[in-house]
Amino acid sequence: MLERIRLESLHQKVTTAENAVKIIKDGMTIGSSGFTKAGDSKAILPALAERGKTENLKVTLMTGASLGHGTDGKLAEADVIRKRMPFQVDPILRNKINNGEILFIDQHLSESAELLHTKNLQSIDVAVIEAAYIERDGSIVPTTSVGNSVTFAALAKKVIIEINTEVPEEVYGIHDIYQAEDYPYRNVIPIVAPWNKIGRKSIPVDPNKIEAIVFTNLKDSPADIAEPDEKTTAIAKHLLGFFENEVQLGRLTDRLLPLQAGIGKVANAVLTGFKDSNFYDLTMFSEVLQDSTFDLIDSGKLSFASASSITVSKECYERVLGNLSKYKEKFVLRPQNISNTPGLIRRLGVIAINTAIEFDIYGNVNSTHIGGTKIMNGIGGSGDFARNAYLSIFVTQAASKGNNISHVLPMVSHTDHTEHDVDILVTDIGLADLRGLAPRERAQKIIDNCVHPDYKEELQSYFDRACKRGGHTPHLLEESFSWHLRFSQTGSMKQATAVEISN
C-alpha cells in the first residue's frame, strides 16, 4: 500500500482512523472531500462520529455536496455537527436541521470556495481528502470527485488524507485541477469548450501540512437510480419535442449546446431520452455525471462530459472504473467553483435542466423547501446554472401523492429561483415556454400547459379573480397560500376533498 505514497517522507504519517481523528478538536471547522456521495471521507468522518458518542465534540462541517455511507446521519446522531454547509441529503441530518438542532447554510455550490478564499467564512482547521494516491511532490490525485477539495487543501492548517485502494491509480488524468487567482488579481478562466483542460492532474498541497494518512478500500455509495416511469417519460418526451422544434426554428442545431442536468430520476429520464433521438455529438458541462451520462457515451450520442463528480449506480461504477481506458478521454472532473462558475456557464451557452419541488403561475420556483419551511436537500448548483444558462429549464410532476399535492400553485411557499431566471417549465402534462412573456401571459401559459386536470379550474379561477383586482403580477394575497394550508389541515390540496373532510 505504501506504493500509493510516492513521497517517501510521508510514509511515517500512516496511521489508523482512530488515531488520525484525534487531530480534530472541539469547535474546529472541517473541510471534507465528497460531492453527491462521490469521493467522500469513508474513514475519518465515521471515526469522528464514534468519538462523538463518548466526547462532547462539536464541529462545523463543509464539503462539496452530500456524503455517502450514511456519514451525515452518523455525525448528526452523535451530535457532532454544530453547523453544516453547503448541501445534504441525509434524512437524519435533515430532521435535526428542521428541528433547529443543527444549523445549516444552504449555499450555491459555486460560492463556498469563493467565500473561503475571500475570508468571508471561518477558516478551515482540518481538511480531510480522499485520494487515489499521493504524488512525489506531495500533491493529491483525487478519486471520483473534486468538489471543494482544492480549496480545502490550500487553506487548511492541517490535512488528513484517506487513500482509497478500491480506486485504481489509472484515475490519474481524469481531473483538471485549476484554481482561479484571488481578487483583485483574478484572470480569465480560459475554457471555451467542455473538453478544454487548463490545469494540472493533481491537487497541490504543502507536504508539511499533511498530519496523517489513512488507508481505506470502500467504493462510493451507489446512486439510487429509478427506472423512467410514466410521468418522467412524459416529461422527457415534452422536452425532447421542444428541442426538436428549436432546431426547426434555427435556434439550435442537432448538436444542441452543452447540457447540464441536476441529480435524480427526472434528470436521468430526460437524458436517457436522448438515446433514441436524432440529436448527436452532444456535450455536457454539468456538476454531476450520472448513469445516463455514460449510457449516452456508450450509445455514441455524447462525445464529452465535464463535471465535478461521478455519482452512479454500483453497476455503472464498476463499468467506468473497471474500463477507464475506454472512458478516460470522454470526461473530466473539475473543482466545483470551476464546473459551476457563472461566467463559464454563460460563455458556453449551457442548457440547464433542474428539478423543482413546486412552481407558481408566474414561473417562480421552489427547489429546496417543503411547505415553505422544511429543507429537503438544498439548492445545490441549480441556481448557478439557472441564472446564467442559455436555457433555464425546470421540471417536476404536475401532481403527486394520489394527486393530493399540486406542484403548480398560486404562489410558491419558498422562492429559490425567481421568474426572471426561468425560461421553460415542464410537467408530465405539458411544457410552458415563458421566454418573452409578461407575467399575465406567463400565468395563462402555465395554467394551459402544465397544471394537473384536478387543479386547473381552481387555478384558472384564482388567476381570473386576481386579474380583476389588478396589478402587474396579480395575486389574491389572502388566498395565495391557501392550497398549502389546506394540505397541512386535510392532507389534500384539492378544494373538494377539503370540503368533504371539514364536513
Image: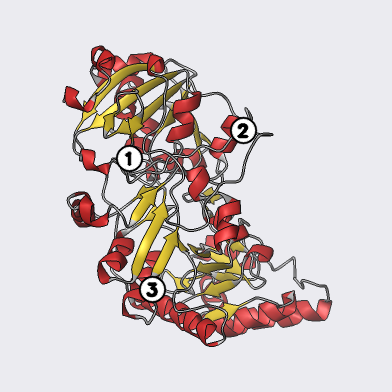
The disc, 3 or 2, on the residue closer to the chain's N-terminal end is: 2
Q: Are marks 1 and 3 in contact (CB under 8 Å)?
A: no
Query: Which residue corresponds to the image point at 54% horizontal and 49% vertical from the top-left?
Result: 190
CA gap, disc 2 to disc 1? Answer: 26 Å
> Residue 158's quadrant in the figure?
top left
For discs 2 and 1, the disc positioned in front in the rendered view: 2
* Residue type, numbered disc 1: Gly
Residue 395, image x, y percentages: 49, 69
Q: Which residue is mark 2?
A: 182
Horizontal relation, residue 98 to residue 472: left or right: left
In the image, taking residue 119 as reference, residue 309 lies left or right, namely left
Point out which mark residue 39 bears: 1
In the picture of the structure, the residue carrying the numbered disc 3 is 232
Closer to the camera: disc 1 or disc 3? 1
* Quadrant in which the C terminus is drawn: bottom right
x, y (%) of residue 51? 32, 19
